[in-house]
Image (spheres, grey):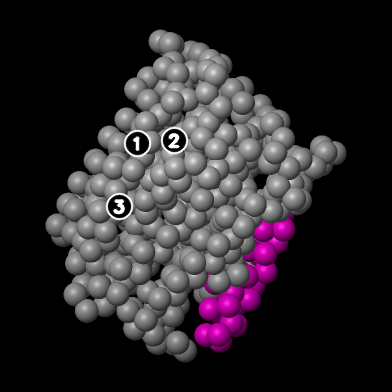
Amino acid sequence: MAEDDRTDWNGHHKGSAAYSRLLAALALAGVATFAQLYSVQATLPQIATELHISASLAALSISAATVGLAVAVIPWSFIADRIGRVKAMTIGICAATALGLILPLCTELPALLAVRLLEGMALGSIPALAVAYLNEEVHKLSAAVAAGSYVAGTTIGGLLGRLVSGVVSDFAGWRFGTLAASLLATLAAVAFLMLLPKQRGFVRARGKGIGPALMLLASLCKDQRLLALYAQAFLLMGGFVALYNYLGFRLMAPPFLLPAGLIAFIFLAYLAGTFTSRWGAAMTVRFGRRAVLLSSIALMAAGILITIPDNLTAVLIGVIVLTGGYFAAHSVGSGWTGAIAVSGRAQAASLYNLAYYLGSSVIGWAGGLVFQSFGWPALALLVAGLTLLAGLLNFLAHRGRPQTTTTATAL
């Protein structure tokens, strides 16, 4: 959409049939996207064993996909300005599911990483466009809750992809594990295409060159509130992925010695994120985005610290708490980005996702170097520090500004 254009379309209202279909469709898109994106995370120890590589090298299979997604989100936003949000998301999700079915055929690390890179680039269409699509198609008073519902769908996708691949890989190997997750994602993608309502708020962008596009991106980067949200996305997502990347390696080693199939059930902690992503968005109506965001970040940091002792109960509680805090913060942050950027909304969301997935790629991989050299406590302390830094940056960016709830139009 040319974000400067306006239509008389006010969006679907909460409770309408189209609103429910839209949320269900985007939840399924979240399942299709994130079931594929992170399905290999539950199989990293098996990949490392079969390919005779280190934990950090195995984690590159995650980073390759998230790098691909990160570099693709901004191009997808401009493509969608020309052809429409729905068409762009359809192309991306179909390409990604095809690549996901090819993945189990890879027998060498370079081929595996190449397919994951392309898969991530295709998957970039959904996170790049989903929030912009919501803000165009849903009434503004319901947009924050709708965004929370979409994020809840992504948590279900992330959970199912990891759980299915982890359980299947325990008795059939990582190839069948990732194949099972890809088949699940394919079914979700088909349901997404069948349910998604026709777009009504989209206005095709007029032809513009690269110069105006770069100027638009530069103008968005001048807003300190957006920069703080982008930094939060980089730091929180990077730390979150690093913890989950190496949690399996920790739990398979002494003193835990858990089998891969049982470790996969640790990802049920994602259900906490399914709840808190919607809960956090709803709480912004009462307490404002800033208060909920900072509280969620503090909750995530507390959960990280709880995982440090070599006690399985403490690890489980900590993972649940940090996951709940993370997804509440992400739900608020992603929705706030679209609300701040009245102009260039799709590009603002794409910059958020660029930072988000670069964090996953860089910190998610680099955390393995810390884990391999100094162990879990060092990794946990590092991620807790990054989490608190994200909170500090957002506190400073919004200091002195009035608290605003999601019913306001500016913030």
* Rendered residue at 83%/38% (across/down): 402
Q: Is residue 91 left or right of residue 144?
A: left
Q: Which residues are magenta?
A: 294-319
Q: Identify which residue, 302 or 127, lies in the foreground.
A: 127
Q: Identify which residue, 26 or 364, lies in the foreground.
A: 26
Can you tell which of label 3 and label 2 is closer to the viewer?
3
Say which amino acid is labelled 2: Leu
Secondary element at tag 3 = helix
Q: Is residue 146 above or below residue 199?
A: below
For disc 1, the marked residue is: 89
Q: How many marks?
A: 3
Say which amino acid is labelled 3: Ala
| Residue 165: assigned label | none
Q: Is residue 301 magenta?
A: yes
The CA distance from mark 3 to mark 1 is: 13 Å
Upstream in sequence: badge 1 or badge 2: 1
> Does the CB distance between marks 1 and 2 fall below 8 Å?
yes
Q: Residue 242, how many percent across, how many down? A: 49, 61
> Does the CB distance between marks 3 and 1 fall below 8 Å?
no
* Rendered residue at 34%/22% (across/down): 83
Within 10 angstroms of label 3, few (less than 14), some, or many (20 or more) residues?
many
Secondary element at tag 2 = helix
Hey, which residue is sitting farthest front in the picture?
16
For disc 3, the marked residue is: 188
Q: Is residue 318 above or below residue 20?
A: below
Q: Identify which residue, 357 or 385, lies in the foreground.
A: 357
For disc 2, the marked residue is: 129
* Rendered residue at 25%/41% (across/down): 94
